Amino acid sequence: MESEKIPLKILMIAPTPFFADRGTHIRILEEALALERRGHKVTIVTYHIGQDIPKELGSDIEVRRIRRLLFWYHKLEAGPDWQKIILDIMLIRKTFFVARTTRPDILHGHLHEGVLIGRMVQLALFWRKMRLVSDFHGSLTKEMISHQYLFGGLLRKVFQYIEYRINRLGDAALASSWSNAKDISEARGSEVKVIPDGARLFSPADASARKELREKYGVPLSAAVALYTGAFVANKGLEILVQAMPLALEGHPDLVFVLAGFPANELDVMMKKYSVNHDRIRIISPLSYFELGDILSLGDIAIDPKQAQVGQASGKMLQYMGASLPVVCFDTENNREYLGTGGIFAAEETPRALADAILLSVSRREEWSRIGSEHYHRAEMFGWGKTGKSLEKIYETLLDKNR
């Protein structure tokens, strides 16, 4: 039996338009909810745009937003934007004000910008002895490269140096993926705790509900459905998937692709670029995180085309596993950590190899149930409740050192 815990006040710094239906925001939200369920008071400071936390979650998490001075800024999707510099400056001011007035025990900085903001506020209010936890969701430089905002040369080296310096900040550092943890550990000269994204566990839809959903989205009941959910942006591997779909569709007459996420306009650009237009491709956009279970029940297999070079973990894979779906992906360290040997791993990071892996998975229809069950049980190892316990332990260790 656990001893009674002293409730902590935690200020999460989210330099992003929280909440939007994508991985970074899901991690922020679910970490906050997990901590709240353990009795802690969580406040999130963020941009002026984004959804509020749904009332049906029954949460008392307070979301404090910057002023709407950039009233024209409405970008919810991932990716760099020069206007974020102004938003982050405003977020520094907001974080300082909230920290000064609410007196948190812990500053929890998400992403590299959030860590840097947290360090500034920690120094400015040094007498409060707040501890800073750095929560790195991936590599700043690699993400900018994957979004094609940064290439080679001097500018890349400048950002690599900035990332290196930020990686060293914080009284404790967390990484969302095993590959990114290595880079941060090297910068800090000490081991970094890996706190992977958590999994939601979904109850399977009964036959009538599944039939109704397939009819709603125009998917034949007999079809083998390959499903992708998440952001429609290049650094999630979408370009490879878009190129792989026609190759896979040629190889199986009953295969249907369902792609659910946002922004639809970016996916449309990719499909036009590669002249992909097929009557066995369904697009669902936008996709609410809180309606994810219904969409997952449409699928027979799931696809995560994220490449190793991005250096991020994949929350969508855990949701696939929590929905008992076989998973097709690339053979990366992070994917192996999640799936063990149970995934269908593409031989290389190419459209042809991904298409072949999808066709292999489709051909193993008699194994879908067994593989899905194995994935579901592995997903139980990555529950958000475990994340809450791990974060609480890190916080308490830091505060004990401070006493």
Image: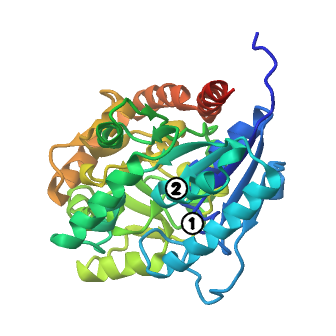
Residue 365, quarter of the rendered image? top left
Which residue does the image show at 50% across and 57% down from the upper left?
A: 116
Local SS, label 2: helix
Relative height, residue 132 to residue 263 (above, below): above
Nearest the viewer among 398 and 55 is 398
Element carrying mark 1: loop
The N terminus lies in which quarter of the figure? top right
| Left or right of residue 303: residue 68 | right
Rendered image quadrant of residue 178: top left
For the residue pair 339 and 356, the one nearer the viewer reads as 339
* Nearest-to-viewer mark from 2 and 1: 1
Q: Residues within 10 Å of mark 2 (few under 14, many from 20)?
A: many
Q: Residue 16 bears which disc, if any?
A: 1
Q: Are marks 2 and 1 in contact (CB under 8 Å)?
A: yes
Image location of residue 293, percent across then percent down: 61, 49
Point 36% across, 30% down: residue: 190
At label 1, counting other C-alpha atoms closer than 10 Å, the crowd grade (few under 14, some 14-19, many 20 or more) is: many
Residue placed at 48% from the left, 39% from the top? 174
Please tell me the numbered disc located at residue 24. Answer: 2
In the rendered image, the vertical position of residue 153 relative to residue 196, given as above or below: below
Query: How is the model colour-coded?
Result: rainbow
Q: Judge whether residue 367 can be spotted in this image.
A: no
Q: How far apart are labels 2 and 1 at the CA level?
A: 9 Å
* Amino acid type at image mark 1: Thr
Does 86 sit left or right of 307 as displayed? right
| Residue at 66% from the left image edge and 69% from the top image edge | 93
- For the view shown, which residue lies furthest in the bottom direction? 72
Residue farthest along the front direction in this orientation? 127
In the rendered structure, the answer to whether residue 311 lies left or right of residue 397 reads left
